[in-house]
Amino acid sequence: MNDDSKQQLNIRLKKLALQAQKYDTASKQRREALTRLINAIWISGKISYPANYRYRLHYQDICDEAVQNLFLYICQGDNIEKYNPERGEVITWVNILLNRRFFPEAIPKIVGKERETNLDKSYMENIPSSEPKNSKSLYEQVIEFIEEDPKKLFVKEFIRGHPEANFKAIAKKRYAGMSWQEISVEWGIGISSLHIFFQRSMKKFAPILKECI
């Protein structure tokens, strides 16, 4: 990103943050402004995660947990008002929060969950198993089970106000290769909302998937 693009990004993020600060905490206008702000931050690619080689096997999970909690924090109560434009850019404020608070807080949450199932393909295909070798990979079995959804649990778990954006539908799109941006455009739902919902749903259904696969 060149200097002009960086400046344009900073101006846009600052405008969105200040706009959100103008509205009442519980107002629809503030929620909409915060959604636009979070999406702009996510799409910018300027989120800076700290290097942590000690937990490299769990690194991506820690990053996902940290950024989800960071976004929730920004959207809750009057937290956006803690951003002071006189002290720096929005992305700087965001990355300081991520590195100093939310990333460290995410480490024990993720590392402590030794039995947590991760639906990432590379992770699923390398889980050691004492069971006889199945002709299908563990990853393929998980996707097949989600698509079958025998108890209709996965279609009942959806983003509020968007029954079409249920866990099953999102999972199928993701594993078909669609990006979060493409899914967001198709359904008109913010990228951060989609991502946070999907990650939370994976954790919620992990025990069911482990039991049935």
Image (spheres, grey):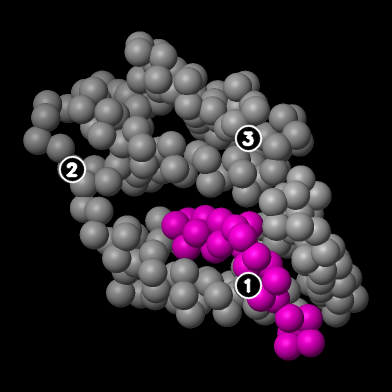
Residue on which disc 2 sits: 128
Contact between labelled residues 3 and 1, with CB atoms less than 8 Å apart: no
Where residue 161 sits: x, y (%)? 65, 28
Asked if marks 1 and 2 touch (Cβ < 8 Å), the reply is no
Task: State which quadrant residue 134 falls in.
Answer: top left
Packing grade of label 3 (10 A; few <14, some 14-19, many >=20) is few
Amino acid at pointer 2? Pro
**Considering depth in this image, is 116 or 144 the residue closer to the camera?**
116
Q: In this figure, which residue is indicated by the disc labeled 3?
A: 178
For disc 1, the marked residue is 94
The quadrant in which residue 125 appears is: top left
Q: Which residues are magenta?
A: 64-88
User: Residue 144: percent from the left, percent from the top?
Assistant: 38, 19
Q: Could you tell me how many numbered marks the image carries? A: 3
Judging depth in this view, the residue of 135 and 173 nearest the camera is 173
Callout 3: helix, strand or loop? loop
- Comparing marks 1 and 3, which lies closer to the viewer? 1
Disc 2/disc 3 C-alpha distance (Å): 28 Å
- Residue 138, located in which quarter of the rendered image? top left
The numbered mark, 1 or 2, whose residue comes first in the sequence reads 1
Of circles 1 and 2, the one toward us is 1
Compare residues 127 and 41 and report the one nearer the observer: 41
**Most common secondary structure along the magenta stretch:** helix
Residue 86 x %, y %:
79, 87
Residue 114 appears left or right of 155? left
Residue ranking furthest to the bottom: 87
Query: In the rendered image, which quarter contains the N terminus?
Result: bottom right
Residue 69 falls within the magenta-colored stretch: yes
Inspect the image, locate mark 3, and give the three-letter code of the amino acid beneath it. Met
